[in-house]
Image: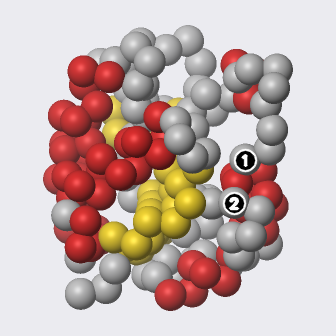
């Protein structure tokens, strides 16, 4: 079985917890979890055909004024020139994108991750809807499972 890469950041917050919870739900043995930091290289993706990126859905303007750069600040610039056309990814432009989900049952005012009536991935709100996290992760995994096998 080919492992699924799950790249996530930042550490010690909602994204970290959700990435690990998702791997538990979908089967830890299927995943290689990688905490994205300043040392993460785009070439690490070469080892995977299936990739999931777990990124905070809250913009840094909502974070504390003590905000320091996190892994995605470093890694996203490395991805901009990296060819992912042969990978199946949830979520990254240029790859075979899977994992879209309906905006129904979400309350939000604006999102750059919406195309039509679909999110370009699975949004999780641990601050306001933490009681829905496990169900949303389970349903999302069931909807993408066949794309990742």
Which label's residue is closer to the chain start, 2 or 1? 2
Quadrant the C terminus occupies: bottom left
Q: Percent from the top left, x then y, of residue 117?
A: 42, 30
> Does the image show residue 72?
yes
The residue carrying mark 1 is 70
Could you tell me which residue is drawn at 35 percent across and 52 percent down? 20
Residue 47 sits above or below residue 131 on the image: below
Could you tell me which residue is drawn at 24 percent across and 21 percent down? 131
Image-based side of 82 in relation to 88, left or right: right
Q: Quadrant of residue 40?
A: bottom right
Image-based side of 149 in relation to 89, left or right: left
Could you tell me which residue is drawn at 57 percent across and 79 percent down? 45
Q: 64 or 50: which is nearer to us?
A: 64
Q: Which mark is residue 37?
A: 2
> Does the image show residue 143?
no
Q: Are marks 2 and 1 in contact (CB under 8 Å)?
A: yes
Quadrant the N terminus occupies: bottom left
Q: Percent from the top left, x then y, of residue 126?
A: 41, 25
Q: Categorize mark 2 by other alpha carbons within 10 Å: few (<14), some (14-19), many (20+).
A: some
Residue 130 sits above or below residue 143 on the image: above
Q: 132 or 29: which is nearer to us?
A: 29
Q: Percent from the top left, x then y, of residue 122?
A: 40, 41
Q: Which mark is residue 10?
A: none
Image-based side of 2 in relation to 5, left or right: left
Residue 135 sits above or below residue 55 on the image: above
Marks 2/1: CA–CA distance? 6 Å
Q: 121 or 17: which is nearer to us?
A: 17
Could you tell me which residue is drawn at 57 percent across and 38 percent down? 56
Residue 60 sits above or below residue 8 on the image: above
SS for tag 2? loop
Q: Percent from the top left, x then y, of residue 95?
A: 55, 69
Q: Categorize mark 1 by other alpha carbons within 10 Å: few (<14), some (14-19), many (20+).
A: some
């Amino acid at each position: 079985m080919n492992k699924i890469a799950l790249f996530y950041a930042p550490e010690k917050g909602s994204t970290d917890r959700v990435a690990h919870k998702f791997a538990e739900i979908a089967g830890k043995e299927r995943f290689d979890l990688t905490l994205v930091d300043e040392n993460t290289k785009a070439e690490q993706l070469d080892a995977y055909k299936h990739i999931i990126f777990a990124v905070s859905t809250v913009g840094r303007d909502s974070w504390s004024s003590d905000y320091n750069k996190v892994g995605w600040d470093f890694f996203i610039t490395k991805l901009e020139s990296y060819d992912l056309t042969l990978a199946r990814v949830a979520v990254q432009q240029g790859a075979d994108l899977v994992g879209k989900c309906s905006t129904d049952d979400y309350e939000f005012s604006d999102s750059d991750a919406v195309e039509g009536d679909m999110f370009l991935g699975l949004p999780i709100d641990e601050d306001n809807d933490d009681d829905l996290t496990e169900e949303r992760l389970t349903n999302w995994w069931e909807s993408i499972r066949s794309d990742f096998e």
